[in-house]
Amino acid sequence: MPRPSPPPPDVLRPLLASLVVAASLSWLPSGEVAAAELPAVAPASLIQWGCVEMLITPCVCPGWPPRPCVHFSYWEPTLLVHTEAFTGLSRAGTDARFHEARVWPFPLKDVDPLGCIFPCKSPNKMLSVFGMIPYFLSDIDPTWRRGDMTLPYPVGLWGLLSPRGGWGTGSDPVASAIAFYRAVDVAALPGAHAIIRPSFIPATLASNVNLGFPKLSPCMKPGYPPIFWESGAGSATGHYLWVWYERRSCCLDPVEVCTSVVRHRDPRLAVACARIRGHPSGTSPAFSRGPVPVDLRLRG
């Protein structure tokens, strides 16, 4: 049986989507921008917080005199990927699943406007319109319809990286998953594909990912066995939202992070702040910038 033809590139729809995002920071498609209605989803609800894996330890800030600081290591949500199943295809055959894919910066400012949860520097914290311009929209990429050849390594049980296109096998959530991984790879290493701007975020099998819509999946690595997450994850409208995480680490002066806001959000940070003598209980920074005494007997 011949494979159904994928939809032709649609230039107008992704451009409209970009304008909607730039104007309102509403990065979800709506109206004519999407083939089906997608409910409004808060960015924080897409994050699987188990993926963050926050680790807080002591460190020494650079400069003179040396002073004790707080070292943060965690996985930050950096990419939001929207895949959409082409409804014109027959979903009866496992070889006839085509997904468009759109790769956006994750709207981290909507989740953490004060930089309390994710304190390290990140380009995703920009408020500028440029910060919300997508990296890749498969709607305007002809190569996505046929795929291009690259290193055909297996992405676990999701499928092969190559050919990098919208065709997938298995259930609809699994076809969305391999389209998600390929799109992240294309955004960083476009090759023959047409992208809007490079993400500089390589697709690796060691990164943390999760499905955020229509069902919040467990935290997993790319290629994680579908039997553990695909049940109940099928989308009636063909829309899926995925989150990609990137490792961040930094050593910060506690004056930048030890506020009452932070202490209420993360009990582990409260412990780190409590190791520093004499911090007040108000909403102002715990202490002024400068040398900070630390009681090493309280170290964890």
Image (cartoon, rainbow, N blue to C red):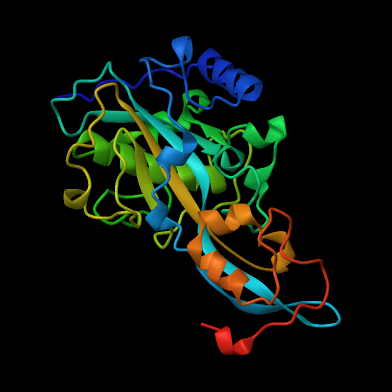
Q: Is residue 164 visible?
A: no
In the figure, is residue 73 to the left or right of 5? Answer: right
The answer to whether 264 is drawn above or below residue 111 in the figure is below
Rendered view: 199 above or below 223:
above
- Side (left or right) of 98 relative to 245: left
Q: Along the line of sight, which residue is nearer the eye, 44 or 178?
A: 44
Q: Name which quarter of the figure residue 242 lies in.
A: top left
How many circles with numbers are drawn on the protein?
A: 0
- Relative to the observer, which residue lies in front, 281 or 103? 281
How far across and how far down the image is residue 165, in percent? 39, 37
Camera-side residue of 212 and 111: 111
Q: Position of residue 203 (x, y in %)?
A: 47, 53
**Image location of residue 71, percent across then percent down:** 62, 72
Give the quarter of the image for residue 195: top right
Q: Residue at x 70, y 73 (%)?
A: 278
Determine if residue 82 is in view.
yes
Q: Relative to 49, is 172 above or below?
A: above
- Give the residue displayed 66% in from the left and 57% down from the top: 259
Quadrant of the rendering where the N terminus is positioned: top left
**Residue 82, horizontal then vertical, whole percent:** 43, 32
